[in-house]
């Protein structure tokens, strides 16, 4: 469990590393960590896929695995607005399902949807 946790932590805390960029290009900006155990690319047999599934298996065993990880969104460029858990305890696409269905780009980042003009945060929508 500690080894799986370390891989999840490394993915979330080191977004500028090459291996995280490769994983993100295959699995999306969340790296598949926000897919509730059902990877979009199940047809790829990969070690990362197994790491994702092990983390979700820990959750299914009633161990609150994800609660140990808090994502620091920084400038928002590497955080998915809809798919990552960055505000509250669930992804916004799960909390606001009807609104998420209206979104043109579910892979939009926090930086794409919220911009700071020096005094306030402004929502940017299409």
Image (spheres, grey):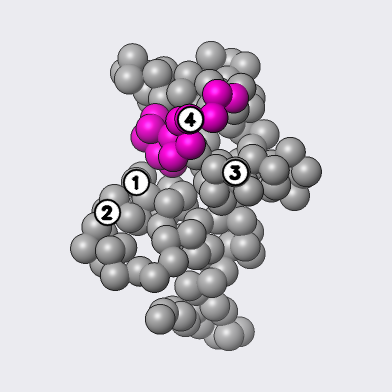
Point out the frontmost of discs 3 and 4.
Answer: 4
Q: Write down the residue under mark 4.
A: 43
In which image quadrant can residue 82 be found?
A: bottom left
Examine the structure image and report whether residue 37 is included in the region drawn in magenta. Answer: yes
Q: Write down the residue under mark 3.
A: 26
Q: Mark 3 or mark 2: which comes first in sequence?
A: 3
What kind of element bears circle 4? Answer: loop
Classify residue 67 as left or right of residue 31.
left
Q: Position of residue 57 (x, y in %)?
A: 40, 18
Q: Residue at horizontal 29%, vertical 70%?
A: 102
Decide: marks 1, 2 in contact (CB < 8 A)? Answer: yes
Q: Mark 3 or mark 4: which comes first in sequence?
A: 3
- Judge the density around disc 3: few (<14), some (14-19), many (≥20) Cα neighbours within 10 Å: some
Does residue 56 appear in the picture of this structure? yes
In the rendered view, tell whether residue 19 sits above or below residue 55. below
Q: What is the CA distance from the residue labelled 3 to the residue labelled 4?
A: 12 Å
Region rendered in magenta: 34-46
Q: Mark 1 or mark 2: which comes first in sequence?
A: 1
Q: What is the CA distance from the residue labelled 1 to the residue labelled 2?
A: 7 Å
- Judge the density around disc 4: few (<14), some (14-19), many (≥20) Cα neighbours within 10 Å: few
Q: Residue at horizontal 74%, vertical 38%?
A: 19
Q: What is the CA distance from the residue labelled 3 to the residue labelled 2?
A: 25 Å
Q: Position of residue 96 (x, y in %)?
A: 26, 59
Q: Write down the residue under mark 2.
A: 95
What kind of element bears circle 3? Answer: helix
Q: Mark 2 or mark 4: which comes first in sequence?
A: 4
Q: Write down the residue under mark 1.
A: 90
In which image quadrant can residue 34 be found?
A: top left
Q: Quadrant of the C terminus?
A: bottom left
The disc placed on residue 36 is none
């Amino acid at each position: 469990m500690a080894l799986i946790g370390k891989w999840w932590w490394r993915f979330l805390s080191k977004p500028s590393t090459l291996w995280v960029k490769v994983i993100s290009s295959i699995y999306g900006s969340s790296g598949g960590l926000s897919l509730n155990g059902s990877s979009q690319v199940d047809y790829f047999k990969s070690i990362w896929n197994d790491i994702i599934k092990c983390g979700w298996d820990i959750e299914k065993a009633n161990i609150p695995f994800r609660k140990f990880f808090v994502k620091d969104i920084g400038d928002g460029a590497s955080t998915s607005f809809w798919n990552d858990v960055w505000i509250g305890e669930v992804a916004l696409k799960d909390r606001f399902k009807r609104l998420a269905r209206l979104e043109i780009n579910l892979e939009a980042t926090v930086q794409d949807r919220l911009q700071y003009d020096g005094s306030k945060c402004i929502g940017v929508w299409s």
